[in-house]
Image: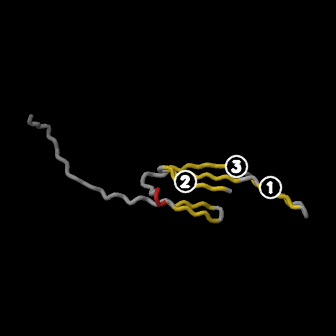
Amino acid sequence: SDLDVTVEGHSIVMKAERKHQHETNTDTVHRLERSYGSVKRKLLLPKNADMDHVETHFTNGVLTLTVPKKAEAPATSRKLAINTGNSKA
């Protein structure tokens, strides 16, 4: 089967295709048929997903995607001036 994983913005797109397989043995009747077709899935990830460091692993027919979070920017604070409505024009 063919498998393709791509990053599009804040989405991961997975496409897979399984091709038809048909097998017949002659000594004793042994027949093997498998399903075929294609599938596409798109996963929308949150804005804090670090799309530049996505890792994929395919082991024993299981696809694992690891998407780390971006480091959060430290919160900033600043004092605001309070307008009392007494404007001098």
Question: Mark 1 near mark 2, Cβ–Cβ under 8 Å?
Answer: no
Q: Residues within 10 Å of mark 2 (few under 14, many from 20)?
A: few
Dots 3 and 2: beta carbons under 8 Å?
no
Is tag 3's residue or tag 2's residue first in the polypeptide sequence? 2
Is mark 1 in CB contact (under 8 Å) with mark 3? no
Q: Residue furthest left?
A: 88
**Could you tell me which residue is drawn at 70 percent across and 49 percent down?**
37
> Between 84 and 64, which is closer to the camera in this rendering?
64
From the image, tell me which residue sits under label 3: 37
Residue tagged by mark 2?
A: 6
Mark 1 vs mark 3, CA separation in Å: 14 Å
Q: In front here: 12 or 83?
A: 12
| In this rendering, position of residue 85 left or right of residue 50 | left
- Residue 82 in percent (x, y) is at 17, 44
For badge 3, the amino acid type reads Gly
The amino acid type, in three-letter code, at marker 2 is Thr
Calculate the distance from the C-alpha at mark 1 to the C-alpha at mark 2: 30 Å
From the viewer's perspective, is 8 left or right of 89?
right
> Is label 3 or label 2 in front?
2
Q: Give the class, few, some or many, for how many residues have Cα within 10 Å of label 3's Cα (few <14, many ≥20).
A: few
Q: Residue at x 56, y 51 (%)?
A: 13
Residue 34 position within the rendered picture, expressed as x and y whole percent measured from the top left:
76, 54
Disc 3 on helix, strand or loop?
strand
- Label number found at residue 22: 1
Q: Position of residue 40 (x, y in %)?
A: 61, 49
Left or right? Give the position of 6 relative to 86. Answer: right
Please name the amino acid that badge 1 sits on. Answer: His
Q: CA distance from mark 3 to mark 2?
A: 19 Å
Q: Which type of secondary structure does the marked residue at label 1 adopt?
A: strand
Q: Nearer the viewer, residue 77 or 27?
A: 27
Quick one: quadrant of the C terminus? Answer: top left
Residue at position x 44%, y 57% in the image: 50
